[in-house]
Image: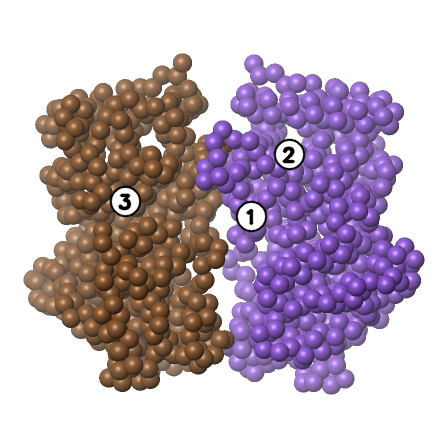
Chain colours: A purple, B brown
Amino acid sequence: MSPKITTELLKQLRQVMKNPKYVQEPVQAYIVPSGDAHQSEYIAPCDCRRAFISGFDGSAGTAIVTEQHAAMWTDGRYFLQAAHQMDNNWTLMKMGLKDTPTQEDWLVSVLPEGSKVGVDPFIIPADQWKRMSKALRSAGHDLVPVKENLIDTIWTDCPQRPCKPLITLDLSYTGVSWRDKIVALRSKMAERKVLWFVVTALDEVAWLFNLRGSDVEYNPVFFAYAVIGMNTIRLFIDGDRMMDPAVREHLQLDSTLEPEFKIQVMPYGSILSELQAVGAGLSPKEKVWLSDKASYALTEAIPKAYRYLTPYTPICIAKAVKNSSETEGMRRAHIKDAVALCELFNWLEKEVVPKGTVTEIIAADKAEEFRSQQKDFVELSFATISSTGPNGAIIHYKPVPETNRTLSVNEIYLLDSGAQYKDGTTDVTRTMHFGTPSAYEKECFTYVLKGHIAVSAAIFPNGTKGHLLDSFARSALWDCGLDYLHGTGHGVGSFLNVHEGPCGISYKTFADEPLEAGMIVSDEPGYYEDGSFGIRIENVVLVIPAETKYNFKNRGSLTFEPLTLVPIQTKMIDVNLLTQKECNWVNDYHQKCREVIGAELERQGRHEALQWLIRETEPLVRV
Amino acid sequence: MSPKITTELLKQLRQVMKNPKYVQEPVQAYIVPSGDAHQSEYIAPCDCRRAFISGFDGSAGTAIVTEQHAAMWTDGRYFLQAAHQMDNNWTLMKMGLKDTPTQEDWLVSVLPEGSKVGVDPFIIPADQWKRMSKALRSAGHDLVPVKENLIDTIWTDCPQRPCKPLITLDLSYTGVSWRDKIVALRSKMAERKVLWFVVTALDEVAWLFNLRGSDVEYNPVFFAYAVIGMNTIRLFIDGDRMMDPAVREHLQLDSTLEPEFKIQVMPYGSILSELQAVGAGLSPKEKVWLSDKASYALTEAIPKAYRYLTPYTPICIAKAVKNSSETEGMRRAHIKDAVALCELFNWLEKEVVPKGTVTEIIAADKAEEFRSQQKDFVELSFATISSTGPNGAIIHYKPVPETNRTLSVNEIYLLDSGAQYKDGTTDVTRTMHFGTPSAYEKECFTYVLKGHIAVSAAIFPNGTKGHLLDSFARSALWDCGLDYLHGTGHGVGSFLNVHEGPCGISYKTFADEPLEAGMIVSDEPGYYEDGSFGIRIENVVLVIPAETKYNFKNRGSLTFEPLTLVPIQTKMIDVNLLTQKECNWVNDYHQKCREVIGAELERQGRHEALQWLIRETEPLVRV
């Protein structure tokens, strides 16, 4: 990778920072956040403004450009990548290190007195605006909204905002009609005494209307907002997508409906003025519900006294609890996904061992090929992490030609991959050795496996938050002085984003919502040795009720059921480090893989892969 | 218990709420918080204003009196007690139940428009003022400080504020002189660029000056504030305690000292005016460091721009990490405490079994008697929880004549007790059966024991926060559907408060500071069956470095060493539910009890108790 030369771009940006055509008053600093107007994790090319101005294209990072400086804040995952991708105009601010200043502190240290700091009010979340604005104000500066995005003014070949066709999902996939979802939402609104709800997250809009899109790679979403009143539904969306007869039928746009279910379709860009009109028409005690992560621009459209902000919206919470149609869909998707991976691993064993011609990229492509043969396959759910040897230790690795290694019988291979099927979203990591793993590699793998089982088999009371389970995944590693520097699990959408809130399993958060039956999360402890190898074992698991001997305070208990059914390589397990209970867990799991995936492989006539599955699911025996 | 009749008192309070002698404008509501001006957990009789006005004397509760209503907010521990102690004038607000309004919401619902809500600004912490003031303001009301405490104006027989003699602690107890503590504090102040530090918590004043007092029962503290500048030390304290030659010598009040170590002694009541003078004399960028729990009155004395507020003060954090003199003192204190408990349990076995004449109160008194025979005994560290049978299920039970039960061979007995010795503070819970426990009682006890061991034997990386260990204590209970509704551990002071921050082991908190070697916490999981029995196993444990096979990122690992060395009743253990590792832990622990406490019992010539100890520490054998 050679760095992007940004001298000329920064010069242009500094000019528009003073150009009265774009700014009321010159701004002495301009902030370029990572996100889009919906605070999406994955963004469309037209929203990659921070990558455009700096060259650094990791998933997290904030750029700040002043008249003299250009600085980039990113976290430990991206220190190396950012250093490679940025030229000398940029200072890398390593977040999480003790001496690294916060953005606010840095701004205060470099700005002349009484400076203006500009930011696109559509891109910055309201909570972040508030924090930053307060810090700047207390140092005598001002955070100011700059309506026209200054990067867009200098980005001459900026790609168009995507506007791709929509997919409609019928009841067999969603279990609940969009009408019933609106009814449920309105009842939550009534409970909290709010009159309006503003849907800003793309996956929330998609879920609410039982629609999917492909405007953003890996995430089956489309650019839209919605504003739901007690008697009105407004959908803000661009393009001719609403001309599609299937979509019109699905949304009943041409039917005679009760007025409260009549969807008014409006241009995507009119959200602000429409919301301002809503805000202007409110009487005292009438409230508008927004996520506290909604953009500053939309939040400001509602006068402060009328705002009702929560960290998680009722849609986010409802979406997380999958109904039986969604759960069944997720099960089907995971069976198909396991078929593809059995094919892949069988193919790898045959190719890697004798020939040695498979690279990380070839393996990733082959995985996609096998997945794409499965029914209702749509696309991958994230960029495949196909990594061998030392590349496996780079947690968010994605093979590119410059780093592409060949799989061999001497190195551990880590594959973290997943797909979007019309019936569900998958995300699975397996760590394999195609030769003979060392005792140390097996030892580390087994600790990770013990952690994976400790979470997967955990029984815990209803109402428990996921972060309370995180240490279970680490205990075996901690016992011998090891650990991993990422969370243990994230929520998974149902044919939606592979990362979704409000639940997860991580020591980092405290604001997660309690786990409840029907939620789906990943369980993915790991161990990484810089320069040598990476190990991760990841299943997607469903929260289910647990049967227990007693039932304290009638609270009921929960546990997890693995949806992912792909063998865990027994060659990597040091069986003597497992307890009998752990050993039984592995054997039961493999028995289920054999039964469920075996039947599907048989049905699909994939006999070689079936033989592979049978070999890989032989029971462990403790000596 | 019969309720306190408060009709006349409330009438008087409502009169002073309108009396221009005390309030600038009439207040329509008056808040009576639990605490004192130092936000102490344990308070002196003169500060029990909420108990005086309502009759409810639990440790947590806030009273609010309006012209029409009187309401009391308290938590689940005290629902029953509060209901018994309060008359019909009072409405009990059960915190934690879904339908219970917050204090702010309730005030908004009952107050006429534009009301004033009064509170003593010395009693309400600044963070609480801020929250409440904001909520009231947004509903059109005002929170106003009422300088004279309105309860004090009607409390004609209010006890005097205690002003008892001080104890000086020399280096052999404290390890660090007060001068060196001041030097370390000033260096933390310089790091954060603050010029002044205000010490408001009583245990922080005591720790800083290596002094102890007895103004508050169970907590060896004294009423005082301190204000530390870079060149000045001001101690705000009343009475003739500073006339004591030992104290004058200890603080070097009559010596010729460098001016920056010269202590200026000032009246306790002058803190506000002195702090206001400090505040008035500040130049821009000069800051004053306060706890964000300091009172609103003291916080307001410093103009907002000059305040530096943190949840934990540098003294709180330094105090939590015990030095070797303190650790050795804690070890000695725990040995003496174990001797007393061996005597007690031996005595109980001889009294309870054949005679059946021992009540909970007699047992508690006997425990105190044995403790008081030990060297450097000062007082108990909290009210002894001596509870048998169903009383054991009341987590914060304290035996009183009305509830006092007789210990028997048919019930589980739970004793949670501790003492202040000049060299350390103890807190230990043991659960015993003097007859034959049922299989179910043993099963529950063993799950609690498994949780206790899981925490005590846990190995975890340096930098881990205690709340991440909480689930380890619950896992065995969770597996069979059981749990307990309190945290697992709290910080313990060194001849100071038995509960201290900033560390602990609880699912409830996220803001705890990371555990580090030298910190001391309790490990006390339990199980409680309403109406039947209570089980808790509590040791005080010291955080120590752990030896591990590997050392990820050179972070180092930590574990715990039990300081409490009192046998855990093996009769209550179902050994078949223990793993071999757990069994070994119990046997190793008992071996250590036998060696260390045995030697001390021998030295003190307590032969009968020694025989009891030897019997109770026989190794477990798994079949």
The answer as to whether the residues below labels 2 and 3 share one chain is no
Viewer-proximal residue among A248 and B494? A248
Local packing at callout 3 (Cα closer than 10 Å; few below 14, some 14-19, many 20+) is some
Marker disc for residue B397: 3
Classify A380 as above or below A2. Answer: above
CA gap between label 1 and label 2 equals: 17 Å
Most foreground residue, B252 or A570: A570
What chain does badge 2 belong to? A
Q: Mark 3 and 1 residues: CB-CB less than 8 Å, in contact?
A: no
Identify the mark nearer the N-term, 1 or 2.
1
Judging depth in this view, the residue of A518 and B165 nearest the camera is: A518
Dot 2, how many residues are within 10 Å of its Cα: few (below 14), some (14-19), or many (20+)?
some
- Which residue has dot 1 on it? A514
Which label sits in the foreground, 2 or 3?
3
Find residue A166 and report its horizontal and vertical position in percent: 85, 55
Residue at coordinates 64% horizontally, 66% vertically from top-left? A290
Taking the image as shown, residue B448 lies to the left or right of residue A465, namely left
Chain letter for the residue marked with disc 1 in the picture = A
> Does A571 sit above or below residue B161?
above
The answer to whether tags 1 and 2 share a subunit is: yes
Instruction: Tell me which amino acid carries mark 1.
Output: Pro
Residue marked by disc 2: A561
The answer to the question of whether label 1 and label 2 lie on touching residues, with beta carbons closer than 8 A, is no
